[in-house]
Amino acid sequence: MIIEGSRIRALREREMLTQQELATRLQVNRSVVCRAEKNNENMSLDRVIKYAMALGVNVSELTENPLPKRAFDEYMEYHKDLEAIQDEQDQDADIKILQCLKKLNSEGQQEAVKRVEELTEIKRYRNEY
């Protein structure tokens, strides 16, 4: 789908977002947003929906034509499956962390908590929502 860069910029400005804020929502580098705003981009359906969700708009506000309902339904079903897989992986990680903590005495558990808190301060280890 061809998306006009000026439309992306107008919607971003309407939502009072900086390029960096939109990039953070999209989990991309700011230069990706900058490039998209300067050009007419040929985007995949997945990418169009990500931009729409990040901007808080309907897909039809980004495109000339509304998205066919069937395509949107298929996309949403696919992403529900991906989210379920991610949730399962997150649960596995939680279980592993708890199993490791149980092996430690009280002092070791306190130290582990401190180290995890330190990791949360390092940007590359944080989830950005």
Image (cartoon, rainbow, N blue to C red):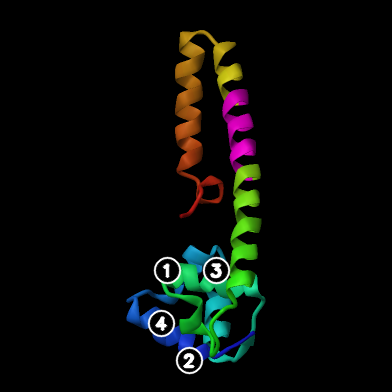
Q: Earlier in the sequence, mark 1 or mark 4?
A: 4
- SS under mark 3: helix
Q: Earlier in the sequence, mark 3 or mark 2?
A: 2
Q: Nearer the observer, disc 1 or disc 4? A: 4
Are the two marked residues, 3 and 2, in contact with CB atoms closer than 8 angstroms?
no
Q: What residue would you read off at disc 3? A: 50
How crowded pointer 4 is (Cα within 10 Å; few <14, some 14-19, many 20+) is rated as: some
Residue type, label 3: Lys
Residue that lies at the very extreme toward the top in this rendered image: 105
- SS under mark 1: helix
Distance Cα–Cα, label 2 vs label 1? 17 Å
Distance Cα–Cα, label 3 vs label 4? 14 Å
Q: Nearer the observer, disc 3 or disc 2? A: 3
Q: What residue would you read off at disc 4? A: 11
Q: What residue would you read off at disc 1? A: 21
Q: Is residue 81 left or right of residue 113?
A: right
Let me know if residue 87 is in the magenta part: yes
Q: Residue at x 62, y 57 (%)?
A: 77
Q: Position of residue 10 (x, y in %)?
A: 40, 87
Looking at the rendering, the stretch of residues picked out in magenta corresponds to 86-96
Q: Earlier in the sequence, mark 1 or mark 3?
A: 1
Residue type, label 4: Leu
Q: What residue would you read off at disc 2? A: 6
Where residue 11 sits, quadrant-wise, is bottom left
- SS under mark 2: helix
Residue type, label 1: Glu
Q: Is residue 80 left or right of residue 22?
A: right
How crowded pointer 2 is (Cα within 10 Å; few <14, some 14-19, many 20+) is rated as: some
